[in-house]
């Protein structure tokens, strides 16, 4: 399917041309090479499954200002999928296009295959959970259907005591489709609306609303993630529970967004389809997207889509693969740069399965053998048929355990975003191999209950950005820039003599944090890089260091941390650079996005005057229909437009939250734009952006 296809990105448009109008010479070249335009990335990601086209600029309008001309602001109208007559013609065309100045970059549309292995011929009340066959949720150990070690599971019952998902939460599954007639997946929600929503086919088939799973993979994956929990028996005697499947009562669990990336009855997809799926899942508001597909060879279009998704509130959870080796499988290997969560497989005895891949960036493992889950109501393409449920294995089915856990976390704490999920999930994992992080199991086996414990109501979450404050010139070496993109990377592609400049920023912890905290940099808002002189692509990176002692901090000494990253100054720039001798940005333009998480003062005071001026947090930001504002319980706030007009007043509830639907006190809808949230002390101010 993909051997004859290429993904090309057009160079920036000339003044006076439209966004997707190539130079005449490029049009002639495409024709001479026998290439046919299939679609654009924007055209493959409609606003909805009815096929209405995407609007030009829709992606760029949601990008944070610091990335306005950067890696996350790629234009999907200028990324094309073209088809050659055969694979030989595609190889020749790729070489020609890579040399053409009208083309920013070109790559094969890389094949991706499913990461499945095989289908083997009190609360909740789901039979497969109760009898112990769903050991990944609750492992009963010796004497249970698969034996193993008691407790070698994700501790689902303890996790469900804290969160069972939310009816308002969307989780996407990019796969072979879904069976909407499977009662554990489809049907109505408690509010009467459908559970399966925003379904879309991005594989190139028509109609784009056709997402029926005839292969037999996507339905199984969706069941692990979100089969209805505590809803009793289906198909005479069976019924399964899902990680984010609700409580069987008022909470119907997450809603499922199926995105079909494999055409027809096949189990093969492409990097272009995966990129389309990530953009669409983010566009419709999914908090996570499960991706149990992968293959060799890095893809730029995949990486761009993953970066854009995670920076805008949707994290991709990717299967590590089933090749038993440490070779990178993409797009999962992008977890090295924090762009997704990479998941391997464990067995009933808390060991990594022998066939689970463990390539670079492996975050953790999750149950992947003898996994009971939902099956289609009709036979699969191979002719195999099961009575609604089956047993299967593979990292394909380990990944949705993690995706479902992302759903539990997002339901409990909607303000979590960006790399927060990756950091919380892996740092709460249960160590199962060599002590500490290791190459075979990453941080350990998924522990959903421990992850939720880390974001209990007493835990505060602070997101912010800070500009670089100090700059220090360090060593000189040859800087190798392999790929254009953010900042001046297009200008300095190739090898140049350069000087590394260390950029740091020191951040004081707010007084509202009353104990030790954890801090990590975020992808969004960070513009510095790692310290090496090899830049294969722009990957936002920073490190956190120089903590002051928590013990002395509680005694009154100021607590602070330092964020550190690198930029470069090209030494052979001369006068031709026009002042652009820095890569990727001048030091004084460097910024760090970060998250602070830790126990906070939830005392009875309603004033935030004694708290930090940044005590309010907002997620998602930017937002479309609704944003959650979090801060001290009982705190009063007001929302203003930039002219200073007061639009809305509110009091944070007992959990420290308020959900703003974009309306003023009179119920009128506010227009898209920038708004300010101000505490009653008149010093606590947050910026909030509403978009169409």
Image (cartoon, grey):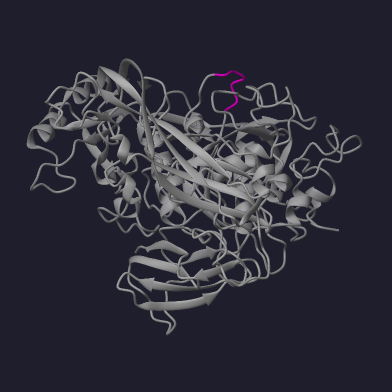
In the image, what residue occupies the spot 50% across and 73% down? 680
Which residue occupies the foreground of this view, 260 or 648? 648
Which residue occupies the foreground of this view, 384 or 146? 146
Task: Answer whether residue 216 is visible to the viewer in this image.
Answer: no
* Image coordinates for residue 688, horizontal then vertical, percent: 41, 62
Q: How many marks?
A: 0
- Tell me which secondary structure the magenta stretch mostly adopts: loop
Judge left or right: residue 618 versus residue 30: right
Which residue occupies the foreground of this view, 338 or 76? 338
Q: Quadrant of residue 582?
A: top left
Identify whether 486 is placed above or below 571: below
Identify whether 185 is placed above or below 37: below
* Image coordinates for residue 433, horizontal then vertical, percent: 73, 24
Task: Answer whether residue 342 is visible to the viewer in this image.
Answer: yes
Judge left or right: residue 470 versus residue 654: left
Q: Spot the residue most to the right.
A: 143
Picture quarter with the N terminus: top left
Q: Does the magenta stretch include residue 629?
A: no
Q: Give the range drawn in magenta.
A: 321-326
Picture quarter with the C terminus: bottom left
* Image coordinates for residue 375, horizontal then vertical, percent: 65, 46
Q: Spot the residue most to the front.
A: 556
Identify whether 167 is placed above or below 118: below
Q: Quadrant of residue 373?
A: top right
Identify whether 483 is placed above or below 632: above
In the image, what residue occupies the spot 28% across and 19% down? 498
* Image coordinates for residue 470, horizontal then vertical, percent: 38, 35
């Amino acid at each position: 399917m993909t051997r004859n296809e290429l993904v090309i990105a057009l160079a920036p448009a000339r003044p006076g041309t439209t966004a997707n109008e190539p130079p005449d010479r490029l049009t002639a070249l495409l024709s001479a090479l026998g290439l046919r335009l299939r679609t654009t990335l924007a055209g493959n990601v409609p606003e909805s499954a009815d096929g209405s086209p995407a609007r030009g600029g829709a992606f760029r309008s949601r990008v944070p200002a610091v990335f306005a001309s950067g890696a996350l602001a790629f234009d999907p109208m200028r990324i094309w999928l073209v088809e050659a007559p055969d694979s030989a013609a595609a190889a020749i065309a790729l070489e020609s296009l890579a040399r053409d100045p009208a083309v920013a970059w070109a790559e094969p549309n890389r094949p991706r295959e499913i990461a499945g292995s095989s289908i083997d011929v009190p609360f909740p009340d789901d039979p497969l959970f109760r009898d112990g066959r769903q050991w990944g949720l609750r492992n009963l150990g010796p004497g249970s259907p698969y034996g193993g070690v008691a407790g070698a599971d994700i501790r689902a019952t303890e996790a469900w005591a804290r969160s069972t998902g939310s009816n308002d939460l969307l989780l996407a599954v990019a796969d072979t489709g879904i069976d909407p007639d499977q009662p554990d997946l489809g049907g109505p929600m408690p509010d009467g609306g459908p559970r399966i929503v925003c379904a879309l086919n991005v594989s190139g088939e028509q109609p784009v609303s056709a997402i029926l799973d005839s292969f037999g993979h996507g339905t199984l994956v969706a069941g692990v993630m979100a089969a209805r929990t505590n809803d009793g028996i289906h198909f005479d005697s069976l019924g399964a529970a899902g990680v984010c499947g609700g409580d069987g009562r008022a909470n119907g669990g997450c809603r499922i967004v199926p995105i079909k990336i494999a055409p027809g009855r096949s189990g093969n997809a492409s990097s272009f389809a995966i990129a389309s799926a990530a953009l669409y899942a983010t566009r419709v508001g999914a908090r996570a997207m499960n991706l149990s597909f992968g293959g060799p060879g890095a893809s730029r279009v995949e990486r761009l889509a993953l970066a854009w998704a995670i920076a805008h509130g949707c994290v991709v959870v990717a299967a590590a693969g089933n090749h038993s080796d440490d070779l990178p499988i993409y797009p999962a290997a992008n977890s090295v740069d924090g762009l997704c969560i990479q998941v391997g497989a464990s067995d009933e005895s808390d060991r990594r399965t022998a066939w689970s891949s463990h390539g670079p960036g492996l975050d953790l493992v999750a149950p992947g053998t003898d996994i009971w889950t939902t099956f289609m109501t009709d036979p699969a393409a191979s002719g195999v048929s099961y009575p609604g449920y089956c047993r299967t294995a593979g990292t394909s089915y380990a990944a949705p355990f993690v995706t479902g856990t992302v759903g539990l976390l997002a339901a409990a704490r909607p303000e979590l975003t960006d790399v927060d999920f990756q950091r919380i999930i892996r740092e709460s994992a249960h160590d199962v191999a060599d002590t500490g992080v290791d190459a075979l199991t990453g941080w350990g086996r998924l522990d959903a209950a421990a992850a939720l414990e880390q974001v209990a109501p007493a835990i505060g979450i602070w997101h912010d950005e800070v500009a670089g404050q100090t700059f220090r010139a360090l060593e000189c070496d040859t800087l190798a820039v392999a790929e254009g993109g953010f900042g001046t990377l297009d200008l300095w592609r190739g090898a140049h003599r350069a000087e590394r400049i260390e950029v740091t920023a020191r951040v004081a912890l707010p007084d509202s944090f009353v104990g030790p905290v954890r801090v990590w940099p975020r992808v969004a808002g960070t513009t510095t890089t790692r310290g090496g002189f090899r830049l294969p692509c722009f990957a936002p990176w920073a490190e956190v260091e120089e903590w002051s002692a928590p013990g002395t901090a509680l005694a009154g000494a100021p607590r602070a941390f330092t964020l550190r990253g690198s930029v470069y100054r090209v030494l052979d720039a001369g006068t031709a650079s026009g002042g652009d001798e820095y890569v990727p940005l001048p030091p004084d333009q460097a910024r760090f996005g970060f998250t602070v998480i830790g126990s906070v003062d939830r005392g009875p005071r309603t004033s935030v005057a004694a708290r930090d001026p940044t005590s309010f947090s907002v997620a998602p930001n930017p937002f479309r229909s609704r944003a959650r504002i979090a801060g001290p319980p009982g705190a009063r706030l007001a929302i203003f437009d930039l002219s200073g007009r007061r639009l809305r007043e509110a009091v944070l509830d007992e959990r420290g939250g308020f959900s703003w639907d974009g309306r003023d006190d009179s119920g009128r809808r506010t227009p898209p734009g920038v708004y300010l949230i101000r505490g009653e002390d008149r010093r606590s101010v947050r910026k909030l952006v509403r978009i169409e």
